[in-house]
Image (cartoon, rainbow, N blue to C red):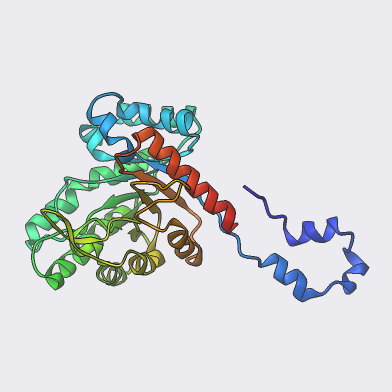
Amino acid sequence: MKNNISRRQFIKQSGILGGALSFVSFPVLNSFAMAPKFDFEISLAQWSLHNALFKKEMTNLDFAPMARKEFGISGVEYVNSFFKDKAKDNSYLKKMNELADDNGVKNVLIMIDGEGHLGASDNSERMTAVENHYKWVEAAKTLGCHSIRVNAAGKGSSEEVQKAAIDGLTKLSTFAKDFDINIIVENHGGFSSNGKWLNKAISSVGMDNCGTLPDFGNFCIKNGKSGCEEEYDRYQGMKELMPFAKGVSAKSHDFDAEGNETKTDFRKMLNIVKKAKFSGFVGIEYEGSALSEIEGIKATKKLLEKIREEYS
């Protein structure tokens, strides 16, 4: 990655510090100093290796070392499904930390599934879901993650689920605030895949530690027997979710001969990310079948690095 020198370093190296400064056009210097820079780190979402994990070809403890050794990636995004019973097991979490530290890997976030609907219309059901997430907030703190990814799901009309989700997210974010953990919602099917709907929900919560995890590919609002029956415009959705983004998920499936993703214009997506002045982790989430999980991850990383270089 290219390292931009500071304006002061530029001036020193040009031999124009001091009296000679009067001969330099300040607009030129300001233009140089304010030149747009696009920089992000690449992380690996554990779901990219879900087949290997479900088949027991690897374990959760293999994930962080593999991210570094196999792919040269220094950030990991866990999925709670692969260590579901370990949220309160401090010795296990300590081992995860040791493995990450030993390999120079940052634990970025935990994706949480199967803990209830934060957008449930029934108050008791919703509060149970909120409390089910508490242990994962605490686990994320222990692991040094900045966030847990949750789902804003529920049954009912768009307005009913949104109202309930706002309440559930507010309660969970209030709990997580004391742990300095973010509660971030992914566009993950149903109403949450409507960018406008999720934008309004997060805006209504109005808490600094409640945000989004925009995913390049999860904009299917309604699935059918033959696939997605109703899809939200993914580029519009990204624009609506990026103002609250604490992370970005680069969903990939297939690639053409030039290495470009065939379902999503990565350059267009990353341009949206750039315009939002995002500089955190962009996570690789490969879900294709044409390439193996390992090769799909490598292809996604190569594409992200190529575009990052183009835009920097």
Residue at horizontal 26 percent and vertical 43 percent from the top: 136
| Res. 88 visible in picture | no
Residue at horizontal 75 percent and vertical 62 percent from the top: 7
Q: Quadrant of the C terminus?
A: bottom right
| Res. 74 visible in picture | yes
The answer to whether 105 appears left or right of 79 in the picture is right
Residue 308 location in percent, x, y? 54, 53
Residues 233 and 142: in front is 233
Residue at horizontal 72 percent and vertical 55 percent from the top: 5
The quarter of the displayed image where residue 202 is located: bottom left
Q: Total of numbered circles in the picture?
A: 0
Residue 290 location in percent, x, y? 32, 39
Residues 35 and 228: in front is 228
The quarter of the displayed image where residue 269 is located: bottom left
Residues 207 and 50: in front is 50
Residue 125 location in percent, x, y? 8, 55
The answer to whether 188 appears left or right of 14 in the picture is left
